[in-house]
Image: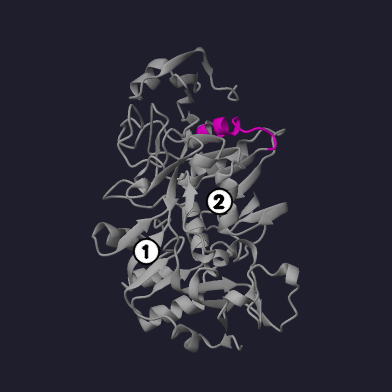
Amino acid sequence: MRKVTTLEEAVTRVQDGMTVMVGGFLGVGTPHGLTEAIAAKGIQDLTLICNDTARPDLGVGKWVVNRQVKRAIVSHVGTNPETGRQMIAGEMQVDLTPQGTLAERIRAGGSGLGGILTPTGVGTAVEEGKQKLTVAGKEYLLELPLRADVALVYAAKADKAGNLVFRRSARNFNAPMAMAAECVIAEVGEIVEVGEIDPDEVMVPGIVVDWLVLGKGV
Amino acid sequence: MALSSKEIIAKRVALEMKDGDIVNLGIGLPTLVPDFLPADVRVTLHSENGFVGLGPLQEVDADLVNAGGQPAGIIPGAAMFDSLKSFELVRGGHLDVTVLGGLQVDEQGNLANYMVPGKMVPGMGGAMDLVVGAKKVVVAMEHTAKDGGAKILKQCTLPLTGKGVVSVIVTELALIRMTQDGLVLEELAPGVTLEEVQAKTEASLIISNGLKTMPGFE
């Protein structure tokens, strides 16, 4: 199946009201070609799942400034004052989620698990409304899976079969998110022929990647 | 030249490390700690955005940043991974020490450092995972708030980052260790009196029989 497509074609998969996962950590490892295109198109009412809301002029931070996000499930918003402002004003729902728990919820969503048990957040506001279980005398929170309609990820390199290789700290949430959406669009720095990536080097198997877009880099 | 408050704190925190420790340093003051490590103590730094082996910046690489999003370096022998592996290491007990700032700490070893409701909502990022996972949790902070109010309290009033997680508090005035009996004042910074520490601390402090001046400032 042909996976390589254009940026314009790829972003037609993202529509108003969708839940969208976006890789990156403060914009590093974010597919900026895709996030820019979505900002430019003004797609609305998005539920954003991302580590953070970057900065007002960067990555998904622009979506927040453009008021394209109705709900954000993130671990950190401190670098984007507009997120905090919309949160306090009640204009956007922000579900602050511990970073490790966010990663595990995405993993659960992508790997067929009904949830995960974590000690993180026990005794804090994070436990509100959640089921608490005691296993071998220790308390854990049941954290439920997260899935998305579309995942937008960034990789340094892909082959035409969609096999992904990440580089340095740009891997972050991209790997688990590529497992957890109905449609996975990977923006990549380089596209090579099938067979040019050693199978042992593949970090995300191409079978989970739907579309490849040649990007401009991190 | 006299050390600043932050440098006094960082210098004393450095003595909490043992050679070979795996350490995560929070943003801000904690990043000063490596400058003060004794010559015979080498630690490996974990960066929660996805690697161990954080080192001094050599040359800027857009794919390589620290957990504050700033350009970073890696040392020979570093290992890169995704956010899942990063927090498996954190929660799985593979970190010896985490050093992070604090807004409030209390007699139960509770820590609040991720939000002031209605005012400041940066979010917890990886802090909630770090405080439940690391073997030793060092809170490195100035002893009192900017308005002079106490930060070491009988009971935290801000939302908690972790419940009963603090191992030791290091301030520019004192070192206070959490024990089964409560908070024990073990050390005073040079020139600081017991009376001054007590006046600036709301929590009840147990005065150690071996109360001494902070080492390393002779």
Q: Residue at x 55, y 30 (%)?
A: B12
- Residue B17 part of the magenta-drawn span: yes
Task: In the displayed orientation, state which residue is furthest to the left.
Answer: A89
Please state which of residues B60 and B25 is positioned toward the viewer in this rendering.
Answer: B25
Q: Residue at x 45, y 83 (%)?
A: A11
Looking at the rendered structure, the kind of residue marked 2 is Phe
Quadrant into which the C terminus of chain A falls: bottom right
| Position of residue A213 measured from the top left corner of the image (x, y, whole percent) | 56, 82
Looking at the image, residue A8 lies above or below residue B19: below
> Is circle 1 on the same chain as circle 2?
no
Looking at the image, residue B5 lies above or below residue A31: above
Which chain is home to disc 1?
A
Please state which of residues A1 and A35 is positioned toward the viewer in this rendering.
Answer: A1
Please state which of residues A22 and A67 is positioned toward the viewer in this rendering.
Answer: A22
Looking at the image, residue B178 lies above or below residue B58: above
Q: Residue at x 32, y 40 (%)?
A: B158
Looking at the rendered structure, the kind of residue marked 1 is Ala
| Position of residue B181 measured from the top left corner of the image (x, y, whole percent) | 44, 19
In the image, taking residue A88 as reference, residue B68 lies left or right, namely right
Bounds of the magenta span? B9-20
Quadrant into which the N terminus of chain A falls: bottom right
Within the image, what quadrant is residue B102 found in? Answer: top left
Q: What SS does tag 1 mark? A: strand
Residue B87: mark in rendering: 2
| Position of residue B53 measured from the top left corner of the image (x, y, whole percent) | 67, 50
Whether residues under marks 1 and 2 lie with C-beta atoms below 8 angstroms apart, the answer is no
| Position of residue B162 measured from the top left corner of the image (x, y, whole percent) | 42, 39
Which chain is home to disc 2?
B
Q: Which residue is mark 1?
A: A72
